[in-house]
Amino acid sequence: MPLLVLSLGSNTEPASNLHQAMGALRRKFGRPRLSPVYESEAVGFTGANFLNLVAAFESDEALTDISRFLKDLENQAGRDRSQPKFSSRTLDVDVLLYGDHSGAECGLQLPRAEITRHAFVLRPLADLLPELRHSSGRSYGELWRDFADDGQRLWPIEFDWEPD
């Protein structure tokens, strides 16, 4: 089955929203492999800090169905899509990778461009799947080691998944 890799983030009631999202994701896709949870400063706007992580699942569902499920999940968490791109989020869940899919599919560009642009995506991905290769041919571990944007502060935090 293809590997489905998702980025999750929230800065509005983040612990509650991440617990609820992970419960729904487990019911849909089974038990995930999870990166550490990172707290990071907002990027592109002034706002509360985010909690971010990466989750990997095995799934053979169609990418269109996965995408629709994730949008519904964000909507259930109260995501306000009328807000600017860079704004607070109750829940943001993005497909980073799906098997060997690359290029534009179902309105998504895979692998997702944010992987190499944002520390809050790349670092948890590199922690979880350091040997996996980006379409550039470099491993995520190598990409993180050479990541040059010092302006994106993030740090690992303890996160209790049990309340789920």
Image (cartoon, grey):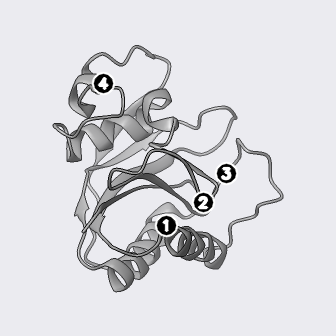
For the residues labelled 3 and 2, the Cα–Cα distance comes to 25 Å
**For the residue marked with disc 1, what is the amino acid?**
Leu
Which residue type carries mark 2? Answer: Cys
Other residues around mark 2 within 10 Å, as few (<14) / some (14–19) / many (≥20): few
Which of the two marks, 4 or 1, is nearer to us in this view? Answer: 1
- Residue under label 1, please give it: 63
Whole-percent x, y for residue 123 in the image: 32, 36
- Residue at 57 percent of width and 62 percent of height: 91
Rounded to the nearest angstrom, the CA distance separating label 3 from label 4 is 27 Å
Q: Which mark is residue 106?
A: 2
Q: Position of residue 30 (x, y in %)?
A: 27, 79
Q: Are marks 1 and 2 in contact (CB under 8 Å)?
A: yes
Task: Please give left or right for residue 39 compared with residue 17 in the image.
Answer: left
Q: Which residue is mark 3?
A: 88
Q: Secondary structure at mark 1?
A: helix
Using the image, determine if residue 41 lies above or below residue 150: below
